[in-house]
Image (cartoon, grey):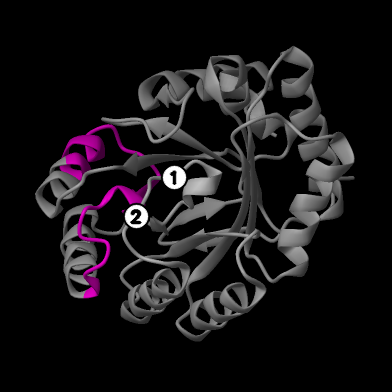
Amino acid sequence: MKKHIKAIDTRGRKLGGETPLLCTPLVGRTRERVLAEATSVLRQKPDLIEWRVDFFDAIGDTDAVVATARALREVVGKRPVIFTRRAESEGGERIAIGDEAVVELYAAVAATRLVDFVDFEIGNDPGHLRRVRECTRQHEIRLILSYHNVGYTPGHDYLVDRFLEAERLGADVAMVQVMPRNRADVLRLLSATAEADDKTRIPLISISLGPLGSVTRMVGGLFGSWLSFAVGESASAPGQIPIGDLVSVYDILRRARGGEML
C-alpha cells in the first residue's frame, strides 16, 4: 500500500494528485515581456506559471517587481504562480543584488500574497533560509526547497538525502534537479526519487536536465515526481519539452495504466 502523500491544493490545482502538474516558466526581462509571455502561454493551459525573476532586469527594484507580480496575477487569474530567483551557482542568471536583498525581495513579494509558491535553494545561508520559511508561513505561501547541480548527477544516497533534507528544513515541496552525463545518471535520479517518495510526506519534483534527461519530464510521475516544467514560449532550463507534447505523453500513460497515472 502506498503511503499517504500530503497533497497541496492551490487554486484548484492539486500538487500530489493523480497526475503530475505542468508548469511553464516566464523569463521576460521587462514587465511588458513577462506579461506578453504569460498571455501567450496561457493559451496552452498550463496548470501553473513560474516567474523566473532572475531574468528580470529590474530585480533590484522591489516596487517594480511587486507591480509586475500584481499585473501578472491579473493576467493569469486563478492559476497558481511560483516565484523563483534561481541562484547563479545553481543554473540561474547573474543578478545585480546580493543574497540579503534577495531575501528581502522574497519577503516583500510573499507579503502581497500575489504568488502561491516561492522556490529557494537549500544551499542558501541557513539564516536566510529560516527567514524565507518564516515569511512564507506567515503569509500562507508554499515553500519549495530545491537542490540543483548543473554539472553532474551525484550518487543515489546523496540525492535521496537532498529530498529528505528539504522536508526536514520545513519545505512544503522538495525539488532536485541534476545534469546527467550518461543513461545511468538518469536512472539513478529516477531510482532516488522513488525511494524518497516512499520516505517523505511532501510532494517531490525531480528533473534530469538536457536532452538526455528529457525522459524524466515525461515519466517522472511514475517514480514520484509531481510536477514538470514545460516550454510555453521560452525554456528556462535545457531539455524542457513543449507543453502540448507533455500533455499527449501524460494522456498515453494514463490510458496505458487504465486511467491511473500513478
For the point 45% across and 26% down, the residue is 240
Q: Assign a secondary structure to mark 2.
A: loop
Q: Could you tell me the amino acid type at mark 2?
A: Ile
Asked whether, in this view, residue 127 is left or right of residue 193, the answer is left
- The mark tally for this picture is 2
Q: Could you tell me the amino acid type at mark 1?
A: Gly
Q: Assign a secondary structure to mark 1.
A: loop
| Disc 2: CA contacts within 10 A as few (<14), some (14-19) or many (>=20) | some
Residue 42 part of the magenta-drawn span: yes
Q: What segment carries the magenta color?
A: 37-62
Q: Position of residue 167 (x, y in %)?
A: 74, 63
From the viewer's side, name the closer residue of 151 and 214.
151
The residue labelled by disc 2 is 95
Q: Quadrant of the N terminus?
A: top right
Q: CA distance from mark 1 to mark 2?
A: 9 Å
Asked whether, in this view, residue 9 is left or right of residue 184, the answer is left
The residue labelled by disc 1 is 92
For the point 80% across and 56% down, the residue is 164
Q: Residue furthest left?
A: 32
Asked which quadrant contains residue 22, the reply is: top left
